[in-house]
Amino acid sequence: CQPVAVQLPVGCGPPHFQNPFRGLIDLVAMKQLTWVPETEGREYVASEIPSELRQEAELWRGQMLDRLSMYSDELTELLLAEQPVPVDLIEAVIRKATIHNLVVPVLCGSALDRIGIQPLLDAVAKYLPSPVDIPPVEGKDPKTGKTIRRKADPSEPFCGLVFKVQAERHGDLDFVRVYSGRLKAGSRVYNPGKDKKENVPQLWRILADDRHQVPEVEAGDIIGIVGMRHSVTGDTLCDPKHPILLEPIAFPETVISMAIEPENTAERKKLAEVLEMMKRQDPTFQARESEETGQTIISGMGELHLEVITHRLVRDFGLNVRVHKPRVSYRETIERTVEVTGRCHRNVAGQMLFAELTIRMEPFSQGVKRVVVCVDPGVDLPAAFLNAALEVLAEQGEGGGMLGYPLMNVRITVLGGKTHETESTELAFRLAARDAFDRALREAGVVLLEPLMRLEVTTPEEHLGEIVNDLQQRRAEITHTHHRGQMTVIEAQAPLANLFGYANAVRSLSQGRATYTMEPCSYGPAPPEVLQSFL
């Protein structure tokens, strides 16, 4: 995908600058658009490009047409003949190339100064694909796993995806993208991911703060539904008679946690209700009650994420809360592959129990970040005993490793077992499975994994040395540096445990001139000294 500039900014900087950003040049129509400050962005004036900007505009327009000529023979012929290129042809080529992921139109504007909003919305309508321009959506049959395709056609069976949940006074508002078919108010839909049916009492068309109730929607619409009980972000909704499960939205695992509690016990119930609502709104946020301490633990994508959550509790819901120091959400995995046999040969409540279960535990990272439990095809055990063992192995995997942190990237395979005619029971195999899991975990060796964050720091050149030295002290690995205008951009990976308070540090080192972004990247082995502190 190649970027193609279709606009140029006129001016640069806030209103108090000598040459403030006040408009833009449309390279397609070759007009200057200037916004009227008194109208707060509602009105702009189209005029001829001033002579002092004409040469630069023609240079950028030539580059735009050269790039677009790669995707249109008609445009190429006009350029070679030095003939004028119609605006309609340029827009048609941009649209076609954009739909085929060949180019990305680049526009400019400022939401703060309300400049460039109207041309941006016009570009969305002109260049981005409509539902009929994209391939049919693919999903799976919930029962057979067979691939199903649905066209963006009102005559197809209904299917849609919940992509956002917003809390409302009278119930959650679910935002749904309708991929195929029609949906009427008052109908029932099926959520195949949760195997639940939902009522759709009302349909709302959302236009910023305005809402309009509509009786029916069809393929291509984005609508709001109030009153669904079970559906959350990433869930599929479909016709109960024609089920389809769309590809779910993949959300990263939380990397940081901290304890939170209300300042008075009377607000404990309200806090629990608000946190549950926030979990439905934001799938990257989790809240649970600690079994050891009884405290409420909230988890998120980073220090700033939890700060925003805490601020919302106070500002939006009037809750006075106390928060404790953030804690890194470590994970565990295993070092090597082992095969062990778990045994149960004991007297329980006057009854002799016998069971043996052989398993293999191995590192496994083929796109799966949790514990996978499976059965070797050659295993010949009664179904009830095997299911009891599999259930325990899955529970143990979810329960955590040697250090108490959740396990990830581990596969457990049941290889076989032994039974006794009278002494083997489901309980015996549950005990044997627990023994096998504990043995395997001890022999496989523990590896502590720490969350790594992807950093991008943008700093003036004169502060580059201080920023780099500080990152190295935080065990960061600098992967790339490059220039962006007059600034230097540093790309790095660093352990989250060493990045607490980094916002204040980077401001101090750069006299407030550097900025940074941070997002979860992956998990990596923690150094020996960190592991030793847990042993």
Image (cartoon, helix red, strand yellow):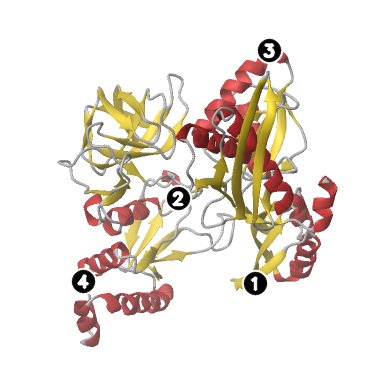
Whichever of labels 3 and 2 marks the residue nearer the N terminus, that label is: 3
Crowdedness near tag 3: few (<14), some (14–19) or many (≥20) residues, C-alpha within 10 Å:
few
Taking the image as shown, residue 178 lies to the left or right of residue 525, namely left
Q: Amino acid at mark 4?
A: Pro
Quadrant position of the N terminus in the picture:
bottom left
Secondary element at tag 3: helix
**Mark 2 and mark 1: Cα distance apart in space:** 51 Å
The residue under label 3 is 266
Under circle 2, the secondary element is: loop
Q: Quadrant of residue 30?
A: bottom left
Q: Which residue is mark 1?
A: 481
Amino acid on which disc 3 is placed? Ala
At 56% from the left edge and 36% from the top edge, which residue is drawn? 419
| SS of the residue under disc 1 | strand
Q: CA distance from mark 1 to mark 3?
A: 52 Å
Residue annotated with mark 2:
377
Q: Residues within 10 Å of mark 2 (few under 14, many from 20)?
A: few
